Amino acid sequence: MNILKKFDWYQWLRYRIWERHHVLKLRYIKPGWHDKDELIIHAMFECLCRFLEDEDPDEIVCWDADVYHAHAWEEMQILYKWWKKRQDRDDDNPIFAPGVEAPGFDNTLDKEWTDPKTGKKERLWKMNFKYSSPEAKKIWNQACDDCTKWEEKCNKEDEEMMDRLIKIRRYMWT
């Protein structure tokens, strides 16, 4: 039998033009460059949000059929609420706390040399931070230290939640 006769052009067009279920639009990420680690978590939780918001799993699946389904449903609810709250997490970043003033900066030439292979002049610039006062410098440095700790805590929390989502992913179908 000829394979072209079996090919369904309507379905081919349908899933490429109107019903693009294979495309993930990340709704909770701001436009611009994002590293892959951030895209991964957004993609994972976008799938969870689409499942809960678009597929009506509470009406289709019997979540109290057994303890595994009940646990998966409870986890989905917890993870969904956490994800929605996570979108405001950057407000807690110590760098953005009231009273923290980011320093200005300027660049000065640190070294200049000629590359022996290419004969091209090379320059190494040094960034100099400019603080409004010694107290502002102290506050900024403390905020940077606190930010590092805050980011570590956030990364651990993200990884824990991604692990939890991975463990229940097989229940995300209707």
Image: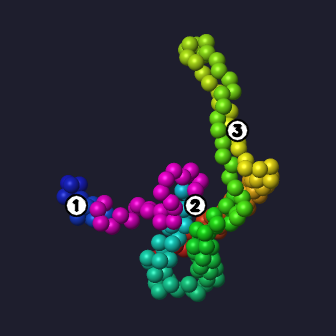
| Residue 66 sits in quarter | bottom right
Q: Tell me where residue 63 appears, x and y as whole percent.
A: 56, 84
| Circle 3 residue | 128
The one nearer the camera, 153 or 99, is 99
| Residue 24 sits in quarter | bottom left
Q: Earlier in the sequence, mark 3 or mark 1?
A: 1
Badge 3 density bin: few <14, some 14–19, many ≥20, Cα 10 Å: few
Q: Earlier in the sequence, mark 1 or mark 2?
A: 1
Q: Residue at x 65, y 21 (%)?
A: 112
Q: Which residues are magenta?
A: 16-38
Which of the numbered marks, if any, corresponds to residue 41? 2
Badge 1 density bin: few <14, some 14–19, many ≥20, Cα 10 Å: few
Q: Residue at x 51, y 50 (%)?
A: 33
Q: Tell me where residue 124 appears, x and y as whole percent.
A: 65, 27
Residue type highlighted by circle 1: Trp
Q: Earlier in the sequence, mark 2 or mark 3?
A: 2
Residue 17 part of the magenta segment = yes
**Which one is closest to the eye, mark 1 or mark 2?**
2
Q: How is the image coloured?
A: rainbow
Distance between mark 1 and mark 2 Cα atoms: 35 Å
Q: Tell me where residue 51 appears, x and y as whole percent.
A: 48, 74
**Which one is closest to the eye, mark 3 or mark 1?**
3
Asked if one can make out residue 145 in the rendered structure from this viewpoint, the answer is no
The one nearer the camera, 5 or 60, is 60
Is residue 48 depicted above or below 71 in this figure? above
